[in-house]
Amino acid sequence: MNFPIVSSLILLPSIGALFLFFINSKNITSIKYVSLFVSIINLLISIYLWLIFDQSSYEFQFVESRVWIKDFINYKVGVDGISILFIILTTFITPLCILSVNSSIKNRLKEFLIAILLMETLMIGVFCSLDLVIFYLFFEGGLIPMFLIIGIWGGERRVYSAFKFFLFTLLGSVLMLIAVISIYWIAGTTDVEELYKLGIDPKYQNLLWLAFFSSFAVKTPMWPVHTWLPDAHVEAPTAGSVLLAAILLKMAGYGFIRFSIGLFPVASEYFVPFIFVISLIAIIYTSLVALMQDDMKKLIAYSSVAHMGFVTLGLFTFTQQGVEGGIFQMISHGIVSAALFFSVGVIYDRTHSRRINDYGGLVNVMPKYSILLMVFTLGSLGLPGTTGFIGEFLILMGTFKKSFLVAAIASLGVILGAAYMLWLYKRVVFGELTNQKLLKIIDLNKVELSILTLLALSIIFFGFYPDPFSNTYSVSVENFINEYNDKLNNYNLQNQ
Amino acid sequence: MINLFYISTEIFLSLSILILLLIGVFKNKSELFIYNFTCIILLVGLAININSNPQFPIDLFNNSYKIDYFTTLIKSVILISAFLVMLCSLNYVKQNDILKVEYPILILSSILGMLVMVSSNDLIVFYVGLELQSLALYVLAAFKRDNILSSESGLKYFILSALSSGLLLYGCSLIYGFSSSTNFDLIYQNSESIEYGIIFGIVFILVGLAFKITAVPFHMWAPDVYDGSPTSVTVIFAILPKIAALTVFINFLYGPFLEMFDQWQAVIIFLSIGSMVFGAVAAIGQKKLKRLIAYSSISHMGFALAGLSVGTNEGIQNSIIYLMIYLIMNIAFFCCLFMLKRENQYFDKVEDLSGLSKNHPLLSLSLMIILFSLAGIPPLAGFFAKFYIFTAVIEQSMYFLAIVGLLSTVIAAFYYIRLIKVMYFDEQKEKYDLNHSIGLKMILVISSTIILIYFINPNIINNFVLDITLI
């Protein structure tokens, strides 16, 4: 038996967290270094996994399967070309979050880092679980650490936000639990690979699809159940917002690919108009809402909703470009939104204000910061040469194949995105320095500079050279589309 | 010749009760000795019980008493939890002036009653066991007799329980009248044709039993009695009678009344949905932890009943797993309550938890694990308990029950996380004492660890119930 590399990826952060638990909480330096060390090791393992990953195969690789609950559920994990990228994203963002706690977290640092590391375990688990029950465990387990991160280390209205986050997500996912159990009784297994082969009886698909959708829609978040996101983002500490925007939202997008579309092709086809409509509402409506915000974090949160609207739009075109674009957009948004939240965190730590009106003219006092923020802003609005462009471009290409009208309306969203991001940048960075407090503000320190530079470099690098990503997922996506079409054709043949 | 070997646990407990009574009468200041000795008796009883586990089902006393793997398992669970309860409440009992000679002896006799209930295969034996259990518990509820709340709760429990016993007896008499026997096996044989008299009898018996496990709408006594009784008695109420009564539920429904599954299924579903929803909604406004846990246990009993309403072996097995995890969580929760004391004064209000995490990080960590588990959030044990139940429920396509149940867990999650919010997000108060007994600490640590790491190998607990096949 080979070395269980995927399981070790999942377990390592938890072991690190357990180790942290036994360190004296006054020993701040060693706590920081241990957690950073663990997360960097995890990053290296995941990169190693990426290197030895066979890109020419669409099969699940590094699959581990062992009996977990006897005669019922097997513990099964593995990666394919789609999930491996999300794992890399997780392991890449987590060390940055840990680095960023220096300035933002003042009390209970140990507990915070334990929560972050546990989150990492759960997030990696979500992306590589190949069994519905295991997936559900990881997916839901994330509620506990995130609830604590928002509630303990959050801002003024943290209690309200933490409750809203917890209850919204829980409400969405209990229906998914019912669907998972129903699948077990309908198909006799919860093993995803087997379910792909067996297929699920089309007459159940619509209801099951809706149950899964209720969970993923809350998590994505899609209009109209997105309202928890701005609150959670605003109140969470910087590292929490970053994790939330960069990775947690992607769990739902990943869930759409792996489960909603993969398991229920007939239902997915049936619900395409529905998804298109609410995606378009998400894109246009939340962009307009974002324009009106005077809180920076809230603005970025609404922009996340709009960007995830693009993702669902792309995924449900079922075209090679659309799905690839959706995946790329998720990765890109993972990096860009993380960078934006880090940037907001930087100035929030200095002035303790997130209101846009309190800023202005930052370019005079924080030149390095202003340059980096420019890169992120352009990445977010999808300027060619950044990762944001590739994702949106592919999605729109895929959508044009399906429907001209939908694509045309979605393109409006791109313009609106440019409007609110550039306006934000203008109000924060340009203009006169009116606020006296800002005169004494210091530019980025070394840690912040290295975090933001790393993110900016990756946005530009992968914007010009997306091949490392696209090579990894293209075979899997191709197979994904083919299987989808096969299943749909079979169904149509049977019904004729 | 009756083989008394198989009921040696019951005989041992009865003899111990008599001997302890004699010691209590003739020896001065023997309270603590008797208390400790009771703990040992429970452990020895457990060993005897496991030792007398029969290879195949045994009928005794003219088929009115049956011993098989299922009853032995439940008896062991009762004895273990009684031992843990006694161990963790020792300090509380000492400091609240209720350490009297009678206290441990009453607990022992109620446990004896439960053991008889669990094994009974005859309506009369069952009723004797039930009353032995209940009478001892009435006294225990009112044990802090100077305290007006405790006396009130004892009286309330007594009167309402007497009412329910009356209904139950009436049901028994109806069944006897229409099936001409009190023996479960004979009732089963004689009641093949469905007669209304028997159905009425079943409903009356179910009402009486639902009262004992606090299923809605027969729950009204629970919050007051839980709140008024001394905490060391509340923990008994929350755990032991429920195990026994739920086992009797199983014995009744899947024994003599199995043929009438269609008739009683609707009743159980009604009790289950009512308990799940009401327990979840009513707990939201509670300010006292003991009242809150009373409502929470109402809701948990709803889930256990949902497993029974299914009518499959999996349903029964999953209900028993649910019960085991429930009792671990409850013992752990009450351990936390026993730790909230300052200079012999015990606290049981929600606001007393305020900011607990700053002063007592380990205690609040355990309490947080327990609360998340009670709320049923994965990957803690409480989630699996519910997961198994709903697996059994959905197998029979009872989607309505599953959806209502799961939605009620969302409502219930609100008040559990409210406690976590109070502990972790609110301002801290004065510190509590740290001088807890080693037993209390051990139980808390071990039970919260079990809750936390149950998911690593669920088979360890699940294997216990695999052999239970009643249908």
Image (spheres, grey):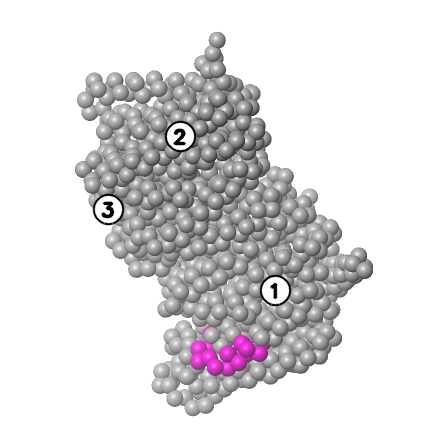
What kind of secondary structure does the magenta stretch mostly adopt? helix
Q: Quadrant of the C terminus of chain B?
A: top right
Other residues around mark 3 within 10 Å, as few (<14) / some (14–19) / many (≥20): some
- What amino acid does circle 2 point to? Tyr
Reading the image, the residue beneath label 1 is A253
Q: Which mark is residue B342?
A: 3
Q: Is residue B367 left or right of residue A134?
A: left
Q: Position of residue A348 (x, y in %)?
A: 42, 75
Distance in Å between CA atoms under marks 3 and 2: 49 Å
Other residues around mark 1 within 10 Å, as few (<14) / some (14–19) / many (≥20): many
Instruction: Pick whichever of labels 3 and 2 is earlier in the sequence.
Output: 2
Q: Position of residue A119 (x, y in %)?
A: 51, 57
Res. A441 image quadrant: bottom left
> Which one is in front, A491 or A238?
A491
Q: Nearer the viewer, mark 3 or mark 2?
A: 2
- What amino acid does circle 3 point to? Arg
Q: Chain of mark 2?
A: B
Q: Is residue A309 left or right of residue B444?
A: right
Distance in Å between CA atoms under marks 2 and 1: 60 Å
* Residue A142 lies in the magenta stretch: no
Instruction: Find out whether the residues at labels 2 and 1 contact each other: C-beta distance under 8 Å.
Output: no
Q: Is residue B341 left or right of residue A180?
A: left
* Residue A295 lies in the magenta stretch: yes
Q: Chain of mark 1?
A: A
Q: Is residue A39 above or below residue B142?
A: below
- What amino acid does circle 1 point to? Gly
Write the residue at 63% across / 44% down: A74
Q: Give the residues in magenta.
A: A283-297
Reading the image, the residue beneath label 2 is B170
